Image (cartoon, rainbow, N blue to C red):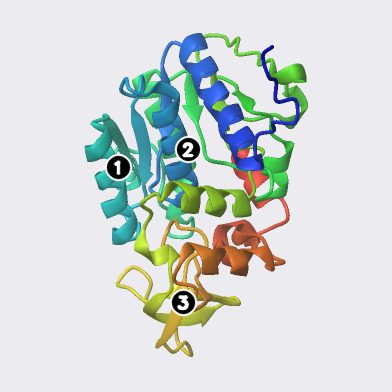
Amino acid sequence: MTETHADYQLSQLDQLEAESIHIFREVASEFEKPVLMFSGGKDSIVMLRLAEKAFYPAKLPFPLLQVDTGYDFPEVLATRDNWVNRLGVRLVVASVEEAIKNGVVIDDGKTSRNRMQTGTLLNAIEEEGFTAAFGGGRRDEEKARAKERVYSHRDEFGQWDPKMQRPELWSLYNGRIHQGEHMRIFPLSNWTELDIWHYLAQEGIEIPSIYFSHQRKVFERDGMLLTESEFNPCKPGEVAEERTVRFRTVGDLTLTGCVESTASTYAEIIDEIAIARVTERGATRGDDRFSEAAMEDRKK
């Protein structure tokens, strides 16, 4: 008589991993030309690790796409290059600076490079003919992201309409699109920041060193600690000083704040995140503080 294990259950992380791998395989089989948006931050690294597992031992069946603001942290770019070289994948870099030079986006001296990423990204998707773009967005990050489905439709102008979301009952995804349209795919939709850190610890994944506690010259602006650099000089009245900090999220260094922290290991970061009451974007992303609907406006 064969023994059965009726009480066998997957852990929460195993369930999330299985769901994400299923999404990657669905997209690879359904869409003609997908691409994975890879910034070198923790969420996109977890996403890339899941993609690696989904198709192992074969190589990834799609390239990576990074939108480079020109103001990225060097530690993040170094980690990005390490992953690209290890996996042997093609990396498409869409430069905001090049987009400004070519008239794709306009630099009016007021708009941040972070916001100019939108036009730069859409231009790269159109030029390369990508029909689906994997993103590392999670529903727990921000109100607009909580509205999006796993398959998030974009029209021929790259616009997102929250009223045009498609049903996803029983994990069935509708990937039908017309010419010029594309889908944004979010394999990490159901993950939380804490899930991400537990998975990073479990897998022993390489991430940028600035996620861990280190000494950095920072100054305070709008309630955030920002990095002093040639791209981000102090304004009158602001004073830069060395502090022990780490980053919860990484992006444009002129807008991405850090938090004071002594957490230098995965376990210490997990303990810190477990009691945090402000999301990483709410705490450290300047571009999402302009209004309650800042991100939703950009998506539209």
Nearer to the camera, 38 or 274 = 274
Nearer to the camera, 124 or 53 = 53
| Rendered location of residue 235, percent (x, y) | 44, 82
- Number of residues whose C-alpha sits closer than 10 Å to that of mark 2, classed few (under 14), some (14–19) or many (20 or more): many
| Quadrant into which the C terminus falls | top right
Sequence-first disc among 3 and 2 = 2
Separation of residues labelled 3 and 2 (CA atoms): 25 Å
Residue occupied by mark 3: 245
Is label 1 in contact with label 2 (beta carbons under 8 Å)? no
Residue for point 26% across, 29% down: 90
- Number of residues whose C-alpha sits closer than 10 Å to that of mark 1, classed few (under 14), some (14–19) or many (20 or more): some
| Rendered location of residue 108, percent (x, y) | 44, 54
Residue occupied by mark 1: 83
Q: Quadrant of residue 34?
A: top left
Sequence-first disc among 1 and 2 = 2
Q: Amino acid at mark 2?
A: Met
| Rendered location of residue 43, percent (x, y) | 50, 46
In the figure, 163 relative to 199: above or below?
above
Sequence-first disc among 3 and 1 = 1
What label does residue 47 carry, if any? 2
Question: What kind of element bears circle 1?
Answer: helix
Left or right: residue 168 versus residue 74 is: right
Separation of residues labelled 1 and 2 (CA atoms): 12 Å
Q: Amino acid at mark 3?
A: Val
Q: Quadrant of residue 38?
A: top left
Q: Is residue 234 visible in this depiction of the protein?
A: no
Left or right: residue 179 versus residue 172 is: left
Separation of residues labelled 3 and 1 (CA atoms): 25 Å
Q: Amino acid at mark 1?
A: Trp
Residue for point 30% across, 72% down: 230
Left or right: residue 26 versus residue 37 is: right
